[in-house]
Amino acid sequence: MTAQDHPVGEIIEATTELLEEDSISVAEVVEDLGHSSMAATLLLPAMAVVSPLSGVPLFSTVCGLLIFLIAGQMALGRDHLWLPDWLRRQRISSERARRVLGPMRRMARFLDRHTEARVKILLRQPFVTVPRILCALSGLAMPFLELVPFSSSTLGAVVSSLAVAMLTRDGLVMLVALALLAVASAGLPYLLL
């Protein structure tokens, strides 16, 4: 899988190709996307949390834990992803995944058209460690947001944006994502009241 001209769209297409069986496991997706980059692997659960599936009980928790584990390992500088067996075995029906991937495909086309390598210094060491840590913390917060339906979608949007920034080397997208995180963090206490 190449991610040169349309990196976000390539991730969605690669995942769609896996949906020939009745269901798809986290392990199958990670193994397929893991060959391109860890940012690509991070993007999929983040985009899934933004979808209506985030209203399904425990879906945000599973995606949040996935995001935490992937981004945490990225922050530590690992180049090979490790996930616990119980998380790797989690499955989603192919039919449900197809319904989610439809809107994601449109979002991917938009992102691929509007992103490019800009302000690249923000995506070099030591700066790139900051969004990785923020993604990990956002993923860790998602299980606690299960009590407020769809509240994890805001953090999913932030993580998606940061993953797109890392994938496309677009520092401008990273700055927008950091601004979105600041706004979300300011509003989060009001959601929980």
Image (tube, helix red, strand yellow):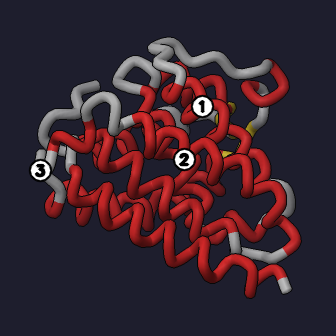
Hey, what amino acid is under mark 1? Gly
Q: Nearer the viewer, residue 43 or 29?
A: 43
* Res. 101 visible in picture: yes
Tell me the residue that label 1 is attached to: 72
Q: Quadrant of the N terminus?
A: top left
Q: CA distance from mark 2 to mark 3?
A: 20 Å
Which numbered disc, 1 or 2, marks the residue that appears first in the sequence?
1
Residue 117 horizontal side relative to residue 130, left or right: left
Task: Identify the amino acid type marked 2.
Answer: Cys
Residue 77 to residue 141: above or below: above
Give the CA distance from mark 3 to mark 1: 25 Å
Residue under pointer 3: 118
Which residue is at a point 72% across and 47% down the rendered structure image?
140
What's under tag 3, amino acid-wise? Arg
Seen in the image, is 129 located left or right of residue 164?
A: right
**Circles 2, 3 touching at the beta carbon (< 8 Å):** no
Q: Work out whether mark 3 precedes mark 1 in sequence or the reverse, and give the earlier one.
A: 1
The residue closer to the viewer here, 120 or 34, is: 120
In the rendered structure, find residue 135 and report the number of the disc placed on it. Answer: 2
**Residue 59 shows in the view:** no
Does residue 33 lie above or below 162 as drawn?
A: above
Percent x, y for residue 8?
A: 31, 47
Q: Secondary structure under badge 1?
A: helix
Which residue lies at the image location 51% right of the left edge and 77% below the top edge?
A: 183
The image position of residue 123, as x and y in percent, is 26, 38
Rendering coords of residue 11 (x, y %): 37, 40
Does residue 118 sit above or below 177 in this rendering? above
